[in-house]
Amino acid sequence: GDVKAGELLEVGYALIEMRQGGFSAAELYKAGYGVQDMKKAGFTCQEVREAGFVDGLKEAGFTCKEARNAGFSVELKRAGYSVRDLKLAGCTLSEVRAAGFVRGIKAAGFTCKDAKRERFPARQLRAAGFTCEEAMTAGYVSDLKVAGFTVEEARAANCTCTDLKAAGYVEGVSAAGYTIQECFEAIYSCEQARAAGFVEGFKAAGYTVKEAKVAGFSPE
């Protein structure tokens, strides 16, 4: 009958001999061999992938480029590769995201403009390592609040009051150092300006009595 790989293993045949004898990577995988054994026996990354191996690819000595060329993609993180490994192997930011990476994206060499171009979600920008200024410069102005950046960070990044309005900031605008005049020019409503922390200067800024009344001000 057919001789199984496991039986040859038990009687002392080396893995490289079994490979030369015609056993496939898939058969040897079922026999209990590990990915490091397969690498030492001369199996290619393509053969290893087709056999079902994923974990331990990097540790076994396969490069990220070899793994990518062999067809691994979303499994690269599980296979042991880092964001930097993927970047050096030529992976796009979309491929890096598909592999499950967020943290370390900036450190690996990707820019915030790369992120914007590949529609990287704003809510993950901070975790990826990008600053508020980088996010603003890359075109994420209206998403700064969604990204988790504070009004103070937006101020330090030289965001205008109009930028803040576009991003949806209200609370804390006054405390961050913006003026009520800037709020008025950025078309914040009188009610929003009040919620932003301003307590005076409404008339001088240009808000009408009617707007002040709607905002909750009383004549008393």
Image: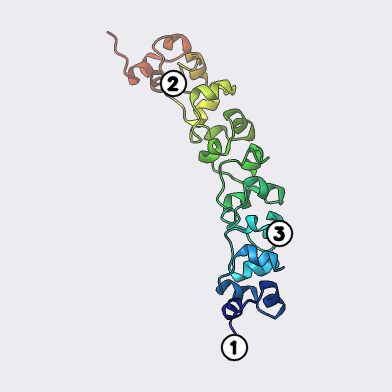
Compare residues 94 and 208 and report the one nearer the observer: 94
Tag 2, which secondary structure?
Answer: loop
Residue 60 screen position, x and y as percent = 65, 58
Q: Earlier in the sequence, mark 3 or mark 1?
A: 1
Q: Relative to residue 97, is residue 140 depicted above or below? A: above
Q: Residue at x 64, y 43 (%)?
A: 117
Q: Earlier in the sequence, mark 2 or mark 1?
A: 1
Say which quarter of the image contains residue 39: bottom right
Q: Earlier in the sequence, mark 3 or mark 2?
A: 3
User: Mark 1: few, some, or many residues within 10 Å (few <14, many ≥20)?
Assistant: few
User: Mark 2: few, some, or many residues within 10 Å (few <14, many ≥20)?
Assistant: some
Residue 66's disc number:
3
Is 35 situated left or right of 142 in this image?
right
Residue 14 screen position, x and y as percent = 67, 73
Check disc 2 and give the amino acid type. Answer: Gly
Residue 197 screen position, x and y as percent = 40, 17
Check disc 1 and give the amino acid type. Answer: Asp
Compare residues 60 and 189 and report the one nearer the observer: 60
Tag 3, which secondary structure?
Answer: helix
Residue 104's disc number:
none
Q: Residue at x 49, y 24 (%)?
A: 151
Q: Distance of mark 3 from mark 1, alpha carbons? A: 33 Å
| Residue under label 1 | 2
Front: mark 3 or 1: 1
Going by the picture, which residue comes out furthest to the left?
220
Q: Distance of mark 3 from mark 2, alpha carbons? A: 51 Å
| Residue under label 2 | 172
Tag 1, which secondary structure?
Answer: loop
